Image (cartoon, grey):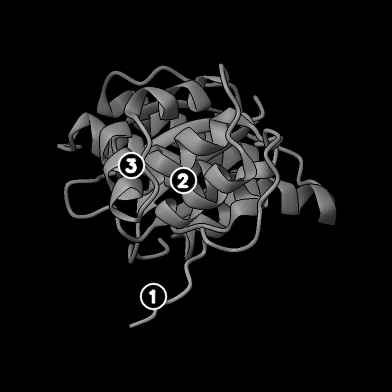
Amino acid sequence: MRNSPSILSTASPPKEPAHMFPKRIRQARQAAGLSLQKLADRMRAAGYPITRAALNKYEVGKAAPTARTLLALSAALRIQSRHLLEDVGVRVEWLAFRRRCRMSKARQEQVRAKAERMVEVRVRLERLLGEAVSAFPRRTEVRSLDDAEHAAAQLRRAWKLGEAPIDSLTSVIEDHGGVVVEVEEAGPDFDGLSGIAEGKHPVVVIRGGQPAD
């Protein structure tokens, strides 16, 4: 019985290292919820033996994969190979998960990686369409309910929102240069994540399916 063709058995890939950005492998691996060892195990099971140490060298930029290894990596990560050849391009500084978050460190890395990719797409799109100007006031330290009420009142005045209920906080945030993304697979143990993109766009990450208000 003839073996079915494999993505790795196609004709003679070039042997020189593929040009790529190391952070992309780490981002894709974390978004898939895989450790370095689990990724190595998945590639080995698919017929491409590789060590955890070799994968780590790719992630820290100490080595570059061949084109054939790049194809094996993208297949194991279930993404298109061109994704690993793109510059990240958008810097996101993650600030904090909300206090009720009960996720493991690995799950937190997964949510950050998924959100980072979505934020990157949004910020790039804004650049193409005419970047929204961030109109967020300076950060206010909040230590009590009264502080929160005061900060909310200041924001309403700055954005001329009046005192009426807000139909969609998501739309209001995005209209003022913020970025809101939903991570569908986050799960009930995820309560929220905040960050700053490019040093000026506040980022809010929420669990999928939350109401707009």
Kind of residue at badge 1:
Asn
* Residue beneath disc 2: 115
The nearer-to-camera label among 3 and 1 is 1
Q: Residue at x 18, y 38 (%)?
A: 103
Residue that lies at the very extreme toward the front in this rendered image: 1
Q: Is residue 129 above or below residue 30?
A: below
Of callouts 2 and 1, which one flags the residue occurring earlier in the amino acid sequence? 1
Which disc is residue 95 wearing? none
Q: Nearer the viewer, mark 2 or mark 1?
A: 1
- Residue type of the residue flagged with mark 2: Ala
Mark 1, residue position = 3
Mark 2 burial class by Cα count in 10 Å: few <14, some 14-19, many 20+: many
**Mark 3, secondary structure of its residue:** helix
- The type of residue carrying mark 3 is Leu
Q: State the residue in front, 213 or 53.
A: 53
Judge from the rendering whether residue 13 lies leftward or rightward of residue 59; answer left or right: right
